[in-house]
Amino acid sequence: MARLKTLTLVIEKGESGYLIGEILELPGCHTQARTKAGLLKRIREAIELYYECESEVSARPIIGIEKISMPKASTF
């Protein structure tokens, strides 16, 4: 039997009326759709793609981790 993992989906309404969904536990995993049903279908696809890409990336050796500083967005 497959183990289930519970993820947190945040849904917001964008300025253009589209629904925007983001999975909090998966940085960069987000999508949008006109309806909630469409959003749920697309976010499941996005999660699958996220895990596929994650497994490809994890196969590459890590050569380092850096911290960088950027000015706050209001200064752009």
Image (cartoon, grey):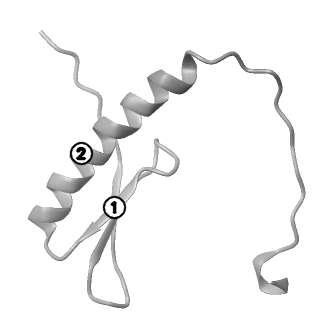
State which quadrant residue 40 falls in: bottom left
User: Separation of disc 2 and disc 1 at Cα?
Assistant: 9 Å
Relative vertical location of residue 17 with respect to residue 44 in this rendering, above or below: below
Residue occupying image coordinates x 45% and y 22% = 55
Which residue is situated farthest in the top direction here?
Answer: 1
Graded by Cα atoms within 10 Å as few (under 14), some (14 to 19) or many (20 or more), the crowding at tag 1 reads many
Q: Which mark is residue 45?
A: 2
Residue 41 % position (x, y): 15, 53
Q: Is residue 63 above or below residue 14?
A: above
Where residue 64 sits: x, y (%)? 83, 26
Residue at figure coordinates x 13%, y 73% from the top left: 35
> Is residue 22 visible to the viewer in this orientation of the structure?
no
Q: Are marks 2 and 1 in contact (CB under 8 Å)?
A: yes
In-front residue for pair 46/1? 46
Please identify the quarter of the rendering in which residue 4 is found. top left
Which image quarter holds the C terminus?
A: bottom right
Q: Which quarter of the figure is the N terminus placed in? A: top left
Q: Amino acid at mark 2?
A: Glu
Lower position in the chain sequence, tag 2 or tag 1: 1
Q: Residue at x 88, y 51 (%)?
A: 68
Picture quadrant where residue 19 is located: bottom left
Residue 44 image position (x, y, % from top left)? 22, 45
Mark 2 neighbour class, 10 Å CA radius: few under 14, some 14 to 19, many 20 or more = few
Residue at disc 2, secondary structure = helix
